[in-house]
Image (cartoon, rainbow, N blue to C red):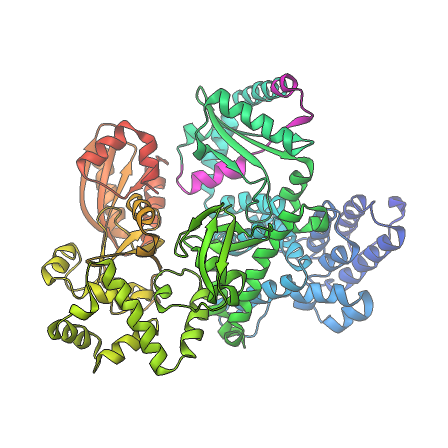
Amino acid sequence: MNLSNLPKLSHPEVDIAQFDLMRVLDYLSDAEQQQVLNACSFGDKAHIKDKRKSGEPYITHPIAVAEILGSFRMDVDTIVAAILHDTVEDTPVTEEDLTAEFGKDVAQIVNGVTKLKSSNEKHVNKAATFYRIITATLEDPRVLIVKLADRLHNMTTIEAVPEKKQQATAKETLDFYVPFARILGLNDLADYIEILCYRSLNAPMYNKLSDKLMQHGLGRTFQQEAIHNYLNVVLGRLDVKGYVKDVDNRVTLFRQFFKNRGEITDLLWHYEFMLVMDKIEDCDQIANYFIKKYQIPAKYIEDSIRHPRAGGNQSLTITYKSDHDTIKVVILTKTMLKTTRLGILMGKAASPVSQSVIQASLRNLQNLIADNEHMAQGPSAAVEVVDKLIDYLHERKIICYTPKGDAYELSRGSTALDFAYTVSTHIGNIAIGAQINGVEAKLGTVLKTGQVVKIHTDKTAEPKAEWLGFVATNKARRALFEWLKGLSAEQREHQGKAAFERALKNQGLVLAELDDGQWQTLLNWRGLQNQSEFFKELTTGKLLPQIAVSRLLTQEQLAKNQAHAHADNQPQSLIADAANMEMTFSSCCHPVYGDPIVGHISKNGLVVHRHKCFSIDEIRRVNDYQVIPLRWRLSTSDDELTKRVYFDAALRIKQNLTDEQVSNVIFIVRDVQAGFEYIEHRNGYTLLFIVVQSRDQIATLIHRLRNLLSYPNIQRLYQWNDEVLLSQAQHPAHALSNAE
């Protein structure tokens, strides 16, 4: 097509936008390019009265969105839909009009990205819109792709809107659009958008790191070239076919900086490279060379070639230190590189295993939608569903595989039995054991990402009530409840009795030896009339047999373990999964409301730990059945309980504070509604001990303190006795494992 003869539109700026768009669409046929021009003319007329906040003709925005998608070589329907994506929302144009003019696919994509405005409450409309985008994306991924390009362009031109609106948009984008993009493997778009979010979220912090990167730009460039040349030498030495690709790792640096994961001076010397090889065998050879040469520990090696990460990303990643530089080398093939960038857009061109991982994520989203479809009838009801969907998007997940290589996505903390139920309810119901990476294991064994799981089954086997004590996924719980519900009263009693017997045995007790006093303690506790009712209750999910057993232990033991709990406001009432259960909060990791948590079923009841607590790993090693996933009860703005419950916390500020700074710190602590206990000055850092109500409150406080103190490294500590603190000061790496 001759670009010099493009049709004139309503404004010179619109003509320029159209010209820029058509320049990138040379991959389309002449007929398809004409469709695009027709869409530009249609959109121009529809938006003729509309202006952007900056004063430009509004149509320049959707045309720019289409240009972004053109750079990804999207099909003509996607390009046309991008040009028209705001017509139904902002103009008299209807979905029927678009169908008649441009076809059903275009109309459906536009409908999928159209905001809903059926309520006077903004958060309700937002939730309804998110729900529509997710459901429409599951039908046609191009919906999300158009929305991401739309959001990208909006973020690049956001300066024209008020600062608070900028921040709200950035937060919304990081909460929803970026994680959604990543599980579909759309990392190119996600990276561009994420870095723009940080700019809008907190301009001073963004500028602080940007300025530092610019100041050190020449030194970083020289060092990057030197490392690049070295990697080329290695490729030549090993005689493998491939090339070195420099990676712009700013999005990683900004993410780490904004999440308080490193000091500026350290982050400046982080470099990332890709080694793009022809064959997987070459990837392995290169990786082995670096691992041996630099003695790289296993924790700095991530092999996702055989077992891709969420989004279908395949690579072999190693990280090593060279002098003061931290170097990350991502080793992958050319196909893997395209999949890492484009994810679901690759379609069948991606490897089968990558496709399988993306499909696993889509399957989970579809299941979430299906499970909550009854709640999503109407905009208001969509709020709760969307909250669950957003939780899912942010949840750290694992990918496990069947022996045939089929991928299944599970939440962290999932067990082999959860895997069985994820594959199918039938397999879960008749599961009797598992094999993990070729080694026999119990059904309660907690899985790790990348493991191959084979479930042993027996057609005569049946589910057990005690399984409710360790399954982590909602699907497994629902399946168990459903099965137990179908039993007769006599069968439920039998199941509960068997589960209780096994729990007693684990504590060295025998059912037949329980006396009348012990039984009366249990029955009074639950408000039940007899043993039969007690056994039946164990099959409802209201009571874990392990917890029931803890009631038979001495009150002195229980009181000792609960000595650190706040007397009048027991925090255990905030645990959704453990209503009416006796529990304590561990002093080894000091969990706070909002932290990811698990429960350790000990002889003294349920002990709540952070999910990354070091002591939990040992407990899991000895007996996986003793660890169960827990969730906090959701808090509302008027929830008085969460406002009355307090948790101890400690922060380590890598700075010696002056008296004036200490005074300002105390003011900020109180200003965020936290309690101040005391400050300790140590060699090179300051310890701040506080009382808080939630994890979010800690995050807000850290953010405020970093701004006040010119962005020092601030870490939340989970252990703070003198012995631990001394160890952390001598071994900084250990501090990282115990700090947020």
**Is 722 left, or right, of 629 in this rendering?**
left
| Residue 358 in the image, given as x and y percentages of width and height | 60, 53
Residue sitting nearer the eye, 109 or 611: 611
Residue 52: name its quadrant.
bottom right
State how many labels appear.
0
Residue at 57 percent across and 65 percent down: it is: 366
Please say whether residue 379 is visible from this viewpoint: yes
The segment highlighted magenta reads 234-261
Q: Is residue 521 left or right of residue 543?
A: left
| Image: 377 above or below 643 | below
The question of residue 739 being in magenta is answered with: no
User: Residue pushed farthest left?
Assistant: 556
Who's the residue at 64% across and 34% down the image? 280
Q: Is residue 425 above or below residue 531?
A: above
Q: At which x and y percent is residue 166?
A: 51, 52
Q: Quadrant of residue 140?
A: bottom right
**Residue found at x 32% / y 42%:** 705
Q: Is residue 111 left or right of residue 580?
A: right
* Residue 69 position within the rendered picture, expressed as x and y whole percent measured from the top left: 71, 49
Q: Which residue is drawn at 89% across and 51% down?
A: 30
Viewer-side residue, 570 vs 49: 570
**Image vertical order of residue 715 relative to residue 552, above or below:** above
Tell me the quadrant of the picture where the C terminus can be found: top left
Q: Can residue 448 be seen in this view?
A: no
Question: Which residue is more in the foreground, 192 or 334?
Answer: 334
Q: Where is residue 704 in the image (x, y as percent from the top left)?
A: 34, 45
Magenta-colored stretch includes residue 240 = yes
Say which of 477 and 213 sits in front.
477
